[in-house]
Image: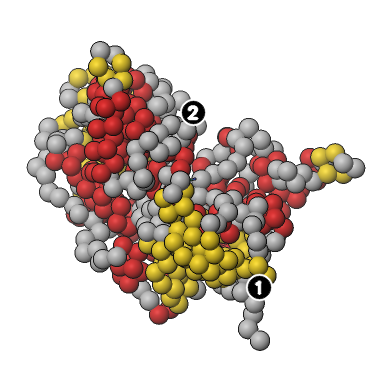
Amino acid sequence: MDDVLLVRAEGISKSFSGVPALKNVCFDLRPGEVHALLGENGAGKSTLMKIISGVYTRDEGELYIEGRAAGDLTPLSAQKLGIGIIHQELNLCPHLSVAENIYLNREVSSFGITNRRKQNREAQKYLAALELDVDPDTPVRELPVSKQQMVEICKTLSMNAKIIIMDEPTSALTDKEIEDLFNVIKMLKAENCGVIYISHRLEELSRIVDRVTILRDGRYIKTLDFADTNLEEIIALMVGRSLNEKFPKIAVERGGKVLEVKNLSSPHGVGVKDVSFELYQGEIVAFAGLMGAGRTETARAVSGADRASAGEIFLGGKKIAVKNIRDAIKEGIYCVPEDRKKDGLCVKMTLAENITLPSLELVSNFGVISGAKESEKALKMKDALKIKTPGIAQCVANLSGGNQQKVVVGKWLMRKAKVVIFDEPTRGIDVASKIEIYNIINELKKQGIGVMFVSSELPEVLGMSDRILVMCNGRITANLETKNTNQEEILKYATRYA
Ligand SMILES: Nc1ncnc2c1ncn2[C@@H]1O[C@H](COP(=O)(O)OP(=O)(O)OP(=O)(O)O)[C@@H](O)[C@H]1O
Ligand SMILES: [Mg+2]
């Protein structure tokens, strides 16, 4: 007899305020398989997963868990059925410890009282499985994003789920952490669990995936055995056309020196150590390196998000003081930050409000915000970036993950800048939208703006930059012409202890 399917979803439809997000979608999950769910930003992947895990209820269709009709699930009843979900956006309580987060609402207790020691011991087991070297007592807010993501993964594993949904688990992880996660996925497979895997990092699929299902615009397109397909076919099915050029690099004559950073250091720990570099007009300089190499810290120091302890910054030959973000913005240095939820967006505000927030003077008349001007600017940006949402009055919290990222990018593009810093701008962005973001970066390049581009994806570093600064342990270890280098050389400098 065939194994009973862990999940069978048939004819699922779901609308939000009358706008359909899923239309008659089918999906199934076998025991012991990793099934990737793929599609562009806003295709409906997270919505389908939230239906399977009881966060949303479906409007139409039937859902069977291990052969039984599931009715309307709630997060709790889904959990009881063995469904665990690692959400795309981190859902941890920052002030609680690692162990408290893992066992939130399921505290490990003795005689009705939370037993912290026992709870920490239990948590430690899961931390060890992921080779995660953190003290279970550490407050989560003190961990970097990648470690927080790993805690989120531990939390789901500790529920002993049989059906594990991973919505973009690797977008913020280091290579080593991805390796550990993939080992855990292999263990889960061996235990006959099923994993639903969502990712925009298509290159990693070949390492773990058995089948793929593709959604486009809320519709089911196709399910394929991974062994019988290839990335070109998958991308064409996702996008509905074939993409001929992944990296639309343009040639621009390099102008004068726009930015010079001399001997920059950050006050705490490894951060940034004695970093010096130059940036020219119309130039894209990528900052490559492993997670924790000091790239984000450099971006933060130059853009005033952190105060440097030593060093000088020159803009157009003139020394400037950047004590905070406001100083940097006044000078024309903008940063598109890495952590969109924390630094980049006000999720409770609308798309239009978020996009125009840094540029209120451009949408105001005599100091009063003009709704008409705000709408006009926001609409223009929504179209330019192809942000998928019914309207600019939509609350940003309701946008899909990738579309939120586009808003973070868009809000800085309204302004006249001299230097724009992008920190992992394409994280969580689908293949086709990545190209739109690259085109925007090219647009800035054409205007003679200097672009600092922090990215952990070497193909895009090599595909889009003119020059590459490699960092390791807070220092710059190499300054490479993009056309004369390759992945191996970059990795060599990224791991060289400097
Ligand atoms: N709570 C909500 N209210 C209103 N609209 C929503 C809500 N949740 C999702 N949507 C809309 O449903 C559509 C599908 O979103 P979903 O988050 O499922 O996309 P996704 O495939 O996960 O995309 P991404 O790759 O960007 O994460 C989007 O247009 C989104 O704006
Ligand atoms: Mg999503």
Please provide percent x and percent y for residue 187. 62, 67
In this view, which residue lies farthest toward the left? Answer: 253
The residue sitting at 64% across, 57% down in the picture is 72
Q: Is mark 2 on a helix, strand or loop?
A: loop
Identified by mark 1, the residue type is Gly
In this view, which residue lies farthest toward the right? Answer: 111
Label 2 and label 1: CA atoms lie apart by 55 Å
Label 1 CB sits under 8 Å from any ligand 1 atom = no
Residue 282 visible from this viewpoint: yes
Q: Which of 126 and 152 is in front in this view?
A: 152
Q: Nearer the viewer, residue 71 or 363?
A: 71
Q: Which mark is residue 67?
A: 1
Quadrant the C terminus occupies: top left
The residue sitting at 39% across, 48% down in the picture is 402
Residue 193 visible from this viewpoint: no
Q: Nearer the viewer, residue 46 or 10?
A: 10
The count of marks equals 2
Label 2 CB sits under 8 Å from any ligand 1 atom = no
Q: Nearer the viewer, residue 296 or 200?
A: 200
Q: Is mark 1 on a helix, strand or loop?
A: loop
Please provide percent x and percent y for residue 432. 29, 56
Q: In which quarter of the image is residue 373?
A: top left
Q: Residue 268 carries which label?
A: 2
Please provide percent x and percent y for residue 256. 12, 32
Name the colouring of the figure.
secondary structure
Identified by mark 2, the residue type is His
Q: In this view, does 366 lie to the left or right of 340?
A: left
The numbered mark, 2 or 1, whose residue comes first in the sequence reads: 1
Local crowd size for mark 2, using a 10 Å CA cut-off: few (<14), some (14–19), many (≥20)? few
Local crowd size for mark 1, using a 10 Å CA cut-off: few (<14), some (14–19), many (≥20)? few
Q: Are marks 2 and 1 in contact (CB under 8 Å)?
A: no
